[in-house]
Image: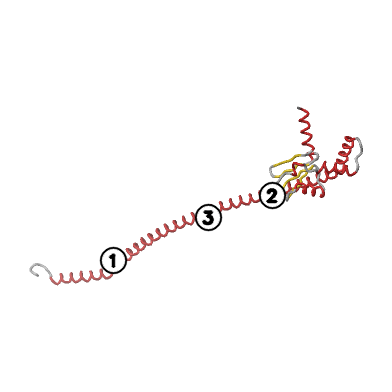
Amino acid sequence: MDALGINLGYILMQVLLFTILFFVLRGYLYNPIINNLEERKTKIAKGLEDARQAAIARDNADAEAKKIMDAARAEAAQLRIDATAQAEETANSIRAQAKQEAEEIVASAREEAEEERNAIMAGARGQIASIAIAAANKLVGESLDESRQRAIIADFFAKVPADAAKLSGTSGEVTSAVPLTDAEQSEVKKALNLEQVTFKVNPSILGGLVVRVGDKVVDSSVASRMTAMRESLQK
């Protein structure tokens, strides 16, 4: 080896030094670098996984938030519908109550007016009777006795037409020009022989009675007689 110019000892020393340097670098530099790179790789992978999980969580949160918002909108819409329906129901109730109260007021006023009218007509009954008796006295040319006068008054106000007494049924309605007395109502009921009789007052018929039983009507009112007489005279 010396003849070739190669120093074996020097070469072995170089190999030994290189080997020592290799192990030193490997132990104190390469391995830490590799370990550091592995740690960074692990951290990067963990960061990417965390980012992926965060993205998934964000997407889930967005979906959940959208679901919550949709549910809130639907609930708000339903609340508006319910509020509108309740408001309409309340308005209808108020209108119905106001209508009922108005009808009650009108009915009460009509009833009061009718009672007042009947009271006025009842007060005028004596005057009407006096006029009727005076007219009868004029026609017969003499004064009528009291019993005859009462008969004329009864006939004028409450005489039941013969045709009405023949009507059959269970209930009827009797209209007179002035309110009938209890005695006159009793006589009318007896003559009609009905289970139920309703009495009404209509001053426009002037006198006599209008009797309705079912769909049949017998009109013996003074107004009806005057109309018939006028039509007869015009022929």
Question: Which label was assigned to residue 187?
Answer: none
Of the numbered discs 1 and 3, the one sitting upstream in the chain is 1
The reply to whether callout 1 and callout 3 are in contact (CB within 8 Å) is: no
Q: Nearer the viewer, residue 228 or 166?
A: 166
| Residue behind mark 2 | 100
Q: Secondary structure at mark 2?
A: helix
Residue 223 screen position, x and y as percent: 78, 36
Q: Nearer the viewer, residue 23 or 99?
A: 99
Of the numbered discs 2 and 1, the one sitting upstream in the chain is 1
| Residue behind mark 1 | 34
For marks 1 and 3, give the CA distance.
Answer: 59 Å
Q: Amino acid at mark 2?
A: Gln
Residue 27 screen position, x and y as percent: 26, 70
Q: Secondary structure at mark 3?
A: helix
Q: Is residue 20 left or right of residue 115?
A: left
Residue at position x 44%, y 56% in the image: 63
Residue 18 against residue 63 in the figure, above or below: below
Of the numbered discs 2 and 3, the one sitting upstream in the chain is 3
Viewer-nearest of discs 2 and 1: 2
Viewer-nearest of discs 1 and 3: 3
Q: Is residue 21 left or right of residue 42?
A: left
